[in-house]
Amino acid sequence: MVKPDSSSVFEYIFGLTVPGVKLELSRVKDFMEVLGKPYTAYPVIHIAGTNGKGSTAAMLAAILGAYGFKTGLYTSPHLVTPNERIRVGNTLVPDEFIIRHVEEWRDTIDALGITFFEVLTALGMVYFKQESVDYAVLETGLGGRLDATNVVDPIVSIITSISMDHENILGDDLATIAGEKAGIIKPLRPIILGKNFRVVRQVIEQKSQLVGAPYTYVPDSVKIRQVEIQGLSQHVRLSIDHQTLGVDLPLLGHHQVENFANVLATLNVLGFSLDASIIQKGLNEMVWLGRLQTLRKGPLVLYDVAHNPEGLARLLESLHELDMDDCIVIAAFNARKNIRPMVDMLEQWSGAVIYSIFAGHSALTIDALERMGVHSEDISRNLQDAYERALELRSSGQQSICFVGSHYLAETLFPMFQDVENS
C-alpha cells in the first residue's frame, strides 16, 4: 500500500471548502455517530461570540494547563497551517494524525458532504480523546446554533462580545445574530456572557431562562479595578467575590482585559480557587498569535487580525491607549467583510494609513478600494511594498507600524519577519 502524500491529503481537505457556508448540523451529527461521539470522552467548555472568543479560549486553556490539567484547544481560523487549530497545551496536532484519519474517513466525508471546517472539528475532537485531555476548550467557527462544534453538551458555555459580522449568514441586526450565538446555551448548563449591548443581554437572558441555564453577566461578577500599560503588556487588577487579583496580561488592549474577565468568571463558576500565581503562570506560557503581536521591536511592528468594524475600533482604541496615535496603519481586508465602516474609521485615524492587498482570491481589490474613495497613491499592491512605504513615511525613531486585517496576512507577514533581529 502506498503511503499517502501529506500535500495531497491537505489539498483534499482544503478542497472541501465550499462556496458560501453550509450551516446545518444533521450531517455533522451523522459523522460524529460514525466516529463514536469522541467529544463525550472529556468535559467541554464551549465559546461563541463575534470578537474575543479566540483570545478568551486561549487564555482559559493556558490557565487550565497551569492548574495542572491537560487541556485541548480548538480554534479557528488558522494563520499559516491548519494544525494551529488543534493543540494540546502548546503542542499542535501532528501532520501524521491528520493524514491517517482523513484517509481513513475519506469515503464517509465524501458520502456525507462534510466540509473543511467540519473535518477539522472532527479531527480536534478525536485527537483530544486520543490524548486523554482533562478539558477541551472549543471555539465556534461561525454563529453557534448550527456551528459544527455545537454537537457537544458542555459543562459551561461562554459568549463573548457580539457585534455585526457575517450578516448575510447570521442576520442583519444584533438581536438576530445574538439568537444564533445563543444556540450554544444548553439546558441546566451555566452560561457566561461577556460585556455586551443591552439587546444582546436580553436575548441571552431570555434563552437562559427558557432552558434553565444558570446565567452570569461578567461585568456584574468581575470588576476591573486597575489597568496600567507596562511596555508591551498591561498590569491589571480585577475583583470577584470579594477577592482581588493582580496579573500581567501579555495581550494588549482594554478588550483583552474584558476577555480575561470572561476567563475569571468561568473559572469561578467552575469552582476553581483563583490563585494569581497559577493564573500568571498560564498567561506567561500562552501562545496566541496575531493579537497586537510584535513582529519586530526596532522599529516596532505589530500585527492584529481585526477584520470587522468592532475589531478595528478596538484595535485603534488600543493603539491610542499605548500612546501610538501616530502609528502607521497598513490595512489589508477580506472582500467578504463589511469594509465601508472600516474605511470610514481609518479616514479618522491620526496617523498615516496605507491600504494593501494580501495574497489570495478573497482579498479586497484595488478597484474596490478606489470605488470606496481610497486614493490610488494610498494603495500598495502587496504587503512588502506597503511595509517599505511605511518605513519611508516614518518621521521619528519612535513611530510604530501596525498591519491589520485578515488572518490571511500571516502567511506573508511571518516569513517577512522571521529572520528579523528584534533589537
Image: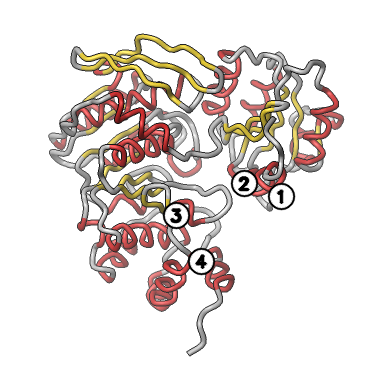
- Tag 1: residue type? Ala
What residue do we see at 56% from left, 17% from top? 317
Label 4: which residue? 13
Residue drawn at x 43%, y 59% as measured from the top left: 93
Q: Mark 3 highlights which residue? A: 92
Q: Quadrant of the C terminus?
A: top right
- For label 2, the residue is 408
Residue 282, image x, y percentages: 36, 34
Q: Earlier in the sequence, mark 4 or mark 3?
A: 4
The circle drawn on residue 359 is: 1
Q: CA distance from mark 1 to mark 3?
A: 25 Å
Give neighbour class at mark 1: few <14, some 14-19, many 20+ (Cα, 10 Å): some
The amino acid type found where label 3 is placed reads Leu
In the drawing, what numbered circle is on residue 26?
none
From the viewer's perspective, is 340 left or right of 191? right
Q: Position of residue 188 (x, y in %)?
A: 13, 38
Q: For numbered disc 3, what is the local secondary structure?
A: strand
